[in-house]
Amino acid sequence: MPALTTNRGTRQGRWRRLLLIAPLVVVLAGCGGVQNALNPHSHPAADIANLFWWMMGISFGGLALVSGIMIAAWFKRGRGGTRSHPNDREAGERLGNKVVIALGVVMPICVVCALFVVGDALIINVTQAPARSSTSLTVKAIGHQWWWQFEYPGTRADTADEMHIPVDTRINLIATTADVIHSFWVPALNRKIDTIPSHANHILIYANKLGSYRGQCAEYCGLQHAHMAMLVIVQTKAAFRSWLHGEAAKARPPATRAEKAGQKVFLDGPCSSCHTIRGTSASGFVGPDLTHLASRKWLAGLTIPNRPGYLGGWIMDSQHIKPGNEMPDINLTGRQLRNLLAYLESLG
Amino acid sequence: MATTVPPPASAEPLVERLEQMWQSRPGILGWVMTTDHKRIGLLYFWTTLVLFGAGGAEALIMRTQLIQPNNNVVGPATYDELFTMHGITMIFFFIIPMTTGAFGNYLLPLMIGARDMAFPRMNALSYWVFLGSAIFIYTSLFAGVAPNAGWFDYVPLAGPKYDPGHAIDFYCLGIIFNGISSSLASANFIVTIFKLRAPGMSINRMPLFCYAQVAASFGLLFALPSLTVATTFLFLDRTIGTHFYDAAKGGSTLLWQHLFWFFGHPEVYILIVPAFGIATEIIPAFTQRRVVAFPFVAIAELLVVFIGFGVWAHHMFATGMPTVTVVFFAAATAVVVIPSTIQVFAWTMTMFTGRPRFRTPLLFICGFIFMFVAGGLTGIMFLAVPFDQQVTDTYFVIAHFHYIIFGAAVFPIFGGMYYWFPKVTGKLYFELPGQISFWTIFLGTNLLFFPMHIVGLEGMTRRVYTYPGGLGWGPENLAETIGAYLTALGIVVLFANLVVSFFKGLPAGPDPWHGATLEWTISSPPPEYNYAVIPKVSSAYANWDYPDREEDRRKLASAVMVLDQGHEQPVSSPVDGWWTEIIEMPHDSPWPIALAFSMFLVFGALLFHQWIVAGFLTIAVAYSLLGWHGTEPQEAE
């Protein structure tokens, strides 16, 4: 099934948008955000957004119709009706019955059937789980309390919170969970899919434009549900291949004295019991794989940027930044922390 | 005593005799032991109002936390408890007990010309169990272990592994305990409606309010078992180590969602259908006209609940169910649109073809129709599965169901409070503050809930205790919080108006609105026996059948159809309303509250996993039941 929306369709959508929401422009001014269902960057998300604009227009019509009848009633308040008796069965009854049948039965049947065909027979073909043969890359998204793990089956690449994908490529995203139910949602690219324990769900991910798209866990999953965001980074195919190659490689060994000392802190301290750095003895699996930590822009489910100051603060006092998260506050001396940061920042 | 319809002089001894016979005990004991449906209705009313205040306060704290990005008024743990308690409170402890327990209890027997509910002591029991369950679940908040997994409490987050401690145990037991109350009340309503209608009130002459009550009662009776099973399984998983919901051990995670929503979706209609009933009483009174397309509306009220049982999985479209399943449930959801639109156009056309007087109750109903249509239209959007999957679990859904629940359930509740205030208190409310309260609440709720649509489409997910700046969600959230405070202000004005009116209002007389139904034929407030003469009914708008009302007065004068030989109540055939027999109704009784209290103790013991203690406490339950049985009223000869 081809996408309903071509480039032309998107342009039409933009016109419709202007027409329909001229009065709402002020409230909708914030539409250009990066995590926005009305700012689509793929054909599934664009189809859904267009469908919404149509539905919204029709809905305002429906609301206006009902409100109009009430307003008309307000204009004839205190008069109207020729009945001598309130229990008269005839007065206005025929008109009322006609309207109830026409607008209360026939009209909704037509509207609902049309919506059903467009939404559940046509657009659903674009948004439903893709046939495996139709996709050319598989990414596995694993929800954890409270971060996202991304694996690229067939390679050893294993990263957190930032999912890289090539542009214009149909991707089969396998969504699953390590603990409770989460929901994988990047509104600019497609609808959401829940992650169910002991069960793998599939969804199509596709982006037709380079850029970074923010997503967030949509199913309430405990204390830090609010801080379980992710970034989908859409790259050219060549850039993606090179990123994946680098990501699959083992960690760069420490070079300077500080980095070596930092690695010792990591391996001897509590860090290695929860985190993996491929190429070292650290192989914990509670927290994210840190093999290429320095290549990431964000930390802790996009809670803080990946800069040495924030990273140091996170290591020493993560419970202050993201209360309830699984990482304990780590007690290090200033020197230990500096060395550890030097090491972690070297993991490009 | 407020103004009454003056009885004919010759009937005075009769009326006096009825008054003595039906009198409640004086003082507090009269309330504790009461079986009078009006007193029980008022008890429900005051209790649910307190809980409404609690749920509203929880909402205001949440809105204050969300007023700006990265705010820090409450932490995540508190916030999770707040939204969980807000949902549980508003659904189980405010709207259901308010529309059925308070409005239903007080008005239903009056509307069908009965002297009480069919099972007056069971009615009292349902109230005391309700009160017990409310105290039970709010104990958790004060003990600092309030439920925190959301009102739909998904496993495994609510399971023993991820939520140890007592929080979810409170949820499970509190919900089961509350379910007992709702089941008792529903059974009572159904029997009352089918058996206690005044002779002559065949099913097609029954007011639409009663259709709504019977629809909601059947809905509750069939939906609650699913919830009880779901919470019992969860309680067993949490306490004795069963694995109903543990996917790793062969259980099913989605089983919870299916069981919960098999209850949860009919529940939504159970919440709003009694409110539809309130609307369909207010509209005729203030337009002085029968509801247009009466049979359509009656059938639609029943159909909404019936079809509501076939749509539960539309809450689960994002769980990865097969496309065929998803589309089936979308189609079922489409069907439920039709009975809703029938009612909307019947209400509005009744206003249009009638002679509307836009007093406060009708204003609230207009607000209700507007909000219900707005929320219903976004509801129709969800039947497009891809769109549903895009916006589910975002603020768009919060906007949708608050338009429905606040707009379509709470607005009619407020309208109903104004409408029946003169009947219950015998005083008129003040009109101007009434209208001010309406407009404040109407503007407030729209300012509160409309921007939620936008912010949801912009990607803001539900149940987040905070959100980052830079995503453009700040202005909407600020507007919502202002709207929340405006709504709260309007509600304060509303209740202030009613309180002042109670003390300073003008006497209302029996029928200030020229209302349509039987309750307007008797004095305000109604006497304890409700009807001195069992009224004659020949249409659903009995108060407008003037010859019948004349006949009642003649009968009272000649002491026909008075039934003054005890707590007597005629029983009619279920459909045609033919007089079949006279039964003797029970008097005040201490056993309902004793039974409810002993059940409370059993649930308390279960909470602490004291199985043996709970076993012994069931003896107290059995003792109360025996005591109850020992005071059955004598069968009428």
Image: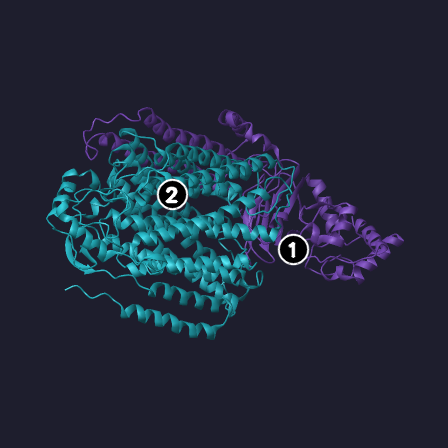
- The tag on residue A324 is 1
Which residue occupies the foreground of this view, B89 or B6?
B6
Q: Is residue B436 above or below residue A292?
A: above
Residue B190 in view (yes/no): yes
1 or 2: mark nearer the eye? 2
At a point 46% along the width and 74% down the height, the residue shown is B613
The number of numbered badges drawn on the structure is 2
Q: Is residue A40 above or below residue B571?
A: above
Q: Is residue A153 above or below residue B470?
A: below
Residue A182 in view (yes/no): no
Q: For numbered disc 2, what is the local secondary structure? A: helix
Quarter location, residue B471: top right
Residue furthest to the right: A257
Q: Which chain is purple?
A: A
Structural distance between the alpha carbons of marks 1 and 2: 40 Å
Instruction: Identify residue for label 2.
Output: B413
Which residue occupies the foreground of this view, B518 or B345?
B518
Quarter location, residue B423: top left
Q: Which chain is cyan?
A: B
Q: Position of residue B550 (x, y in %)?
A: 14, 41
